[in-house]
Amino acid sequence: MIPFSAGDEVTEGEEPTATTSAEKKDEETGFPVDEKSENKTDASATAAEDSETIAVVAISDFHGSLLEEKTGKNPGIAKVAGAIDELKDEYSSVHFISAGDQYQGSAISNLTKGESVNEALEAMGMEASAI
């Protein structure tokens, strides 16, 4: 099989021929080898050196649970903030987001129309949230 691409001319009854300027071909496939790809190992190593690990912290269904419940059902805002602070110590980049449903559910949140929850989440650095 001879590789070819769009724009190559094929005459009926003849084998297609590729019009490429690449001098090297892959021994198994016969396709042209991009000389830039030969240095992939070096490029990958450089990319690994330049990369960083980030943490994305997401909460969902918080339901205004600013206070910790004795039953352990809801950890409360202080424990959530503490966990995020620990991640900020460990990672250079931490992104805090919410999948929503964070207001309705507790008396504190309901009576303040969610403002108490908003203030806490903003202080913790929440970047984005679904409603």
Image: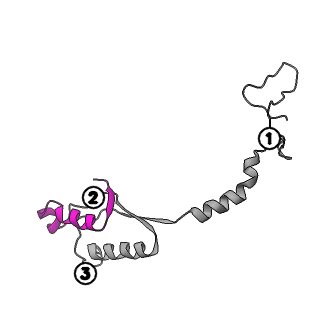
Disc 1 marks which residue?
32
Furthest residue in direction bottom, as rendered: 70
Q: Magenta stretch: residue 62 in it?
A: no
| Range drawn in magenta | 106-131
Q: Nearer the viewer, residue 54 or 112?
A: 54
- Kind of residue at badge 3: Lys
Q: Nearer the viewer, residue 76 or 29?
A: 29
Return the disc, 3 or 1, that comes first in the chain's sequence: 1
User: Residue 40 at what x, y percent from top left?
Assistant: 71, 55
Furthest residue in direction left, as rendered: 111
- Kind of residue at badge 2: Asp
The numbered disc on residue 70 is 3
Q: Secondary structure at mark 2?
A: loop
- Kind of residue at badge 1: Pro
Looking at the picture, does residue 19 appear above or below residue 70?
Answer: above
Query: From the viewer's perspective, is the residue at label 1 or at label 2 nearer?
Result: 1
Q: Residue 50's quadrant in the figure?
A: bottom right
Look at 84% across and 43% down and name the residue there. 24
